[in-house]
Image: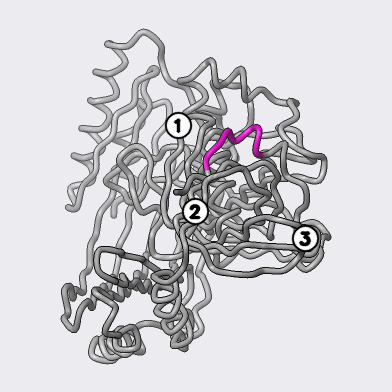
Amino acid sequence: MDIDAIKQALEPADYYEIHLQTNFTTSIVYANQTIEHLQTSITRTGNIRVLFEGGWGFISFNGEDYKRYASEALAMARLVSHHQKEGSHVLTYPPIQDHISSPVAISPAEYSLEQKVHLVQSYHDLLTHPMISRQSVTYRDTTTKTTFVNSEGSHITMNRTFTGLAMSVTARDGTLLQRASDSVGQYGGMELVLGLEQNAETIKKRALDLLKAPPLEAGVYTVLLDPRLAGVFAHEAFGHLSEADFLAENPDMLEVMRENRRFGPEFLSIVDDGSIPGLAGYTPYDDEGISAHKTYLLKDGILTGRLHSRETAWRMNQKPTGNARAINPRYQPIVRMTNTYIEPKDTPLENMIAGIKDGIYACDYLGGMTNLEMFTFSAAYAYRIQNGRITNLVRDVVLTGNVFTTLENIQAIGNDLQHHGGLGGCGKGGQSGLPVSTGSPHILVSNVKIGGV
């Protein structure tokens, strides 16, 4: 790539970015004794994003006529600048020269395609049972090489490998269906997906047990959330409300989410941190060349921060946080979370359980939705807690409520922080499947409304 020729073509711009990316990917889906999908691919893509007199120009490409792409992006920016009421601006940032290479214990390249298929099939076979109507295992590894250059003088290269595997089953008894699943996925190699036989046995047993479990009666309960469900709650119900592009377009919610307002007890802190190596949301530099760091959204119950791109930081007179991300160079970066989690405190799990006379232990995440501050989440499975003891399994546990009220009702936070990534990812603005992780210790919440029968 002739960087000097591109820079010359973009010289009139106020700001520009150049992204180049090469992906080496293997993906496998094995379901119901059949390979449903098997693919290896090499993709080379890139983009140029230009800011000129308040107008953005953007072009993505998979060819090598870089000078032409640069000229077209600049022409777009000129055109946009003549047809808008308010121009865009970005905060400047010191130039960075860096290379990132994530460690891998066992490279996926050391395994043949046949070996990977055999591994996936072995997990699939463990999920087989007469009452399992569908079982599937999905595997993916992607090694990504990226180059980022901008007009400030930054030149960042990264070489990273993401590996993951997801298993799911559907158990059937007449018309009753129950699902169970598990997923692992983060930056690393084959070491992440080996030795998951017990995971397969666990989800098979859980789906079968749920067929026999009674549905939970609707009511208001004291609820103990496990780290997976609590982490998803922090991400979905509060994290998205902390994304500055959303707040900039919703002045009423911006007033609600004003800084220095109390949203929970003084022992509650929620963090987004893309600098944690290995986790699925590990983003040492975002797609605007901003270095990752720890951002407190809530600190001791007080709203102290938001997630920003360069442009939203300029609009709100704050600092960029390293949260401008795109799923690939075909898309422009928007404000996204990275690794979002509730910080641990010091309450042991057994103490929380012992203090519950009549409540619910809700585990993992099956699905849900949010609408501003309102949420609905389905736990993957749950147990009754009676007189300080976990008792029988229950199903159809759907938690609903107002996120701000729920935060205020947090009674205790455990000391057992867990982060979870997986093969799924976060969706926003037409960009789905962005790698993120969620995390939390166990948390205890009072007065939670649960739907049921």
Q: Is residue 405 magenta?
A: yes
Q: Secondary structure at mark 1?
A: strand
- Tag 3: amino acid: Met
Please state which of the two labelled residues, at mark 1 or mark 3, is closer to the viewer: 3
Label of residue 371 in the image? 1
Crowd rating for badge 2 (residues with CA inside 10 Å; few <14, some 14–19, many 20+): many
Q: Give the answer, above or below, for where 240 lies relative to 378.
A: above
Q: Secondary structure at mark 2?
A: loop
Q: Which residue is mark 3?
A: 352
Sequence-first disc among 2 and 1: 1
- Tag 2: amino acid: Val
Q: Is residue 183 visible?
A: no
Q: Residue at x 81, y 64 (%)?
A: 351
Q: Is residue 44 visible?
A: yes
> Magenta residues?
400-406
* Relative image position of residue 162 (x, y in whole percent): 42, 69
Q: Residue at x 45, y 62 (%)?
A: 158
From the viewer's perspective, is 28 left or right of 93? left
Sequence-first disc among 1 and 3: 3
Q: Which residue is mark 2?
A: 397
Q: Are marks 1 and 3 in contact (CB under 8 Å)?
A: no
397 or 439: which is nearer to us? 397
